[in-house]
Image: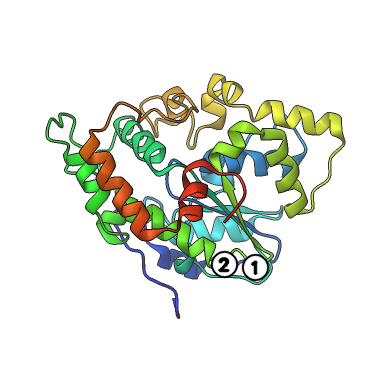
Amino acid sequence: MRNRKLYLGPLTDNRRWDQVRIRPDDVIVVTPPKCGTTWMQTIVALLFSGDPEVEPELSMKMPWIDIRLREMPEVAERVEAMTARRCLKSHTPMDGLPLDEQAQYICVFRHPLDAHFSYRRHLRNMPIRFFDMWYPEDDPDGVTFRRFLDGGAEGFDGDAMPLAHILRHYLTALALVARPNVALFHYADMCRDLPGTFARLADLLEVDHPPALMEQLVQTARFDNMRAQASRFAPGGGQGFMKSDTDFFHSGTSGKWHGQLTELELAAYDALMDAALTPDQRRWLENGGALP
């Protein structure tokens, strides 16, 4: 671990990265949960292969290194045996990852409230119930949102994805954004301009495809197409990892939290955001656009 911060929770253990030998051409997708991880990995898979019919098989070909559900020696052996260029996934903030000088780190963010409400739905779609105490089925007292606001960035809290964990991800990525191999993307920008996202990522990864093929790749990664082929694109699709692969791609829209929170809840969220971020930093984290 050396100087890396420890992130150890019921789902994740960033010490598992110690068993991965990072290669100079690796791409590591680093995000808080429900911020566009699968979408970005799919785009990487399409750009790497240049094949609109590629089978991403994300859980096996682009594994989530941090998750403790698979034995790490098996995962390490599998990724080491890969001969093609690799894309690896992490939900660990950047201060907990091994930072290679050449590997490309792609950090993806989303409005924290959109990520929170998407995570609520995601947990309901999982057959294993990890966080019922934070996300109760019946929640008339607003326990879920209180835990979102008061949870810490690490340990059990971090795996339950509170605001503090999202902010830790964001601030540690911002601290490294001047490095040529660390790039920040926003879910809202991906929604607004998917071709532009492909073009920017292709440039970062030094991948070049003819315009007609790029258009095919973009069409493959559109939300409606991915939802229509959920068993192909969802992590662990077709294997019963989720109750419904289709529900993993719930809507792909933003702002679903509007009308779901009280004025007091929104005021408490605003206070935490304003205390942690500058106005420009907050603007980008919530809406994307030009980086602060």
Asked which quadrant contains residue 66, the reply is: bottom left
Side (left or right) of 155 relative to 28: left
Indicate the position of residue 86 as horizontal and vertical percent values.
65, 54
Instruction: Tell me the distance, in whole angstroms, between the alpha carbons under discs 2 and 1.
Output: 6 Å
Q: Compared with residue 248, is residue 102 higher up or lower down, i.e. above or below?
A: below
Q: Element under label 1?
A: loop
Q: Element under label 2?
A: loop
Asked whether the viewer can see residue 18, the reply is: yes
Specify the color scheme: rainbow
As drawn, which residue projects farthest toward the bottom?
Answer: 2
The residue indicated by pointer 2 is: 176
Kind of residue indicated by mark 1 = Arg
Q: Quadrant of the N terminus?
A: bottom left
Indicate the position of residue 59 as horizontal and vertical percent values.
51, 43
Q: Compared with residue 170, is residue 229 higher up or lower down, i.e. above or below?
A: above
Give the camera-side residue of 270 and 206.
270
**In the rendered structure, are the residues bearing label 2 and label 1 in contact, judged by CB atoms less than 8 Å apart?**
yes
Asked which quadrant contains residue 139, the reply is: top left
Side (left or right) of 193 relative to 269: right
Side (left or right) of 132 relative to 54: left
Kind of residue indicated by mark 2 = Leu
